Amino acid sequence: MTKTKNKILIADDEPALLSLMQTLLSPHFEVVVAKNGDEAQKYIENEEFLFLILVLMTVHIRFALPTN
């Protein structure tokens, strides 16, 4: 039986860092990458993630944390 991996989001505007983190974490998680804050915000609004890795960017990301 295949175990479903938890999904995480990594957002950064540096392609090399995104690639490195995706390579390191993909054996353990389903990794979704966002190349900028706008893209990350769209993912956050439409999908659920176990956790987010948001590298500081100049774009402000606004989202509400679940209350459960």
Image: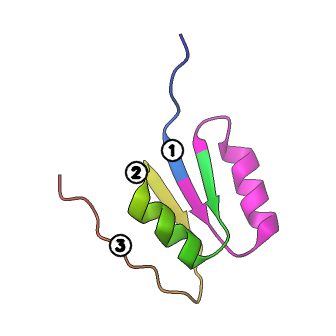
**Residue underneath mark 2:** 48
What percent of the width, then of the height, locates residue 29? 58, 39
Q: Magenta part of the protein: which range? A: 9-30
Task: Give me the disc on residue 63.
Answer: 3
**Circle 1: residue type:** Lys
Inspect the magenta stretch and tell me whether residue 38 lies in it: no
Task: Give me the disc on residue 7.
Answer: 1
In whole angstroms, how far apart are the C-alphas of marks 3 and 1?
Answer: 18 Å
Placement of 19 over or under 7, stated as above or below: below
What percent of the width, then of the height, locates residue 11? 60, 67
Q: Residue at x 72, y 62 (%)?
A: 18
Look at the numbered discs 2 and 1 and tell me whether their residues touch, using CB distance below 8 Å.
yes
Placement of 26 over or under 9, stated as above or below: above
**Circle 3: residue type:** Phe
- Is residue 61 toward the left or the right of residue 53 in the image? left
For the residue labelled by badge 2, is the local secondary structure a helix, a strand or a loop?
Answer: loop
Q: Please tell me which of labels 3 and 1 falls first in the chain.
A: 1
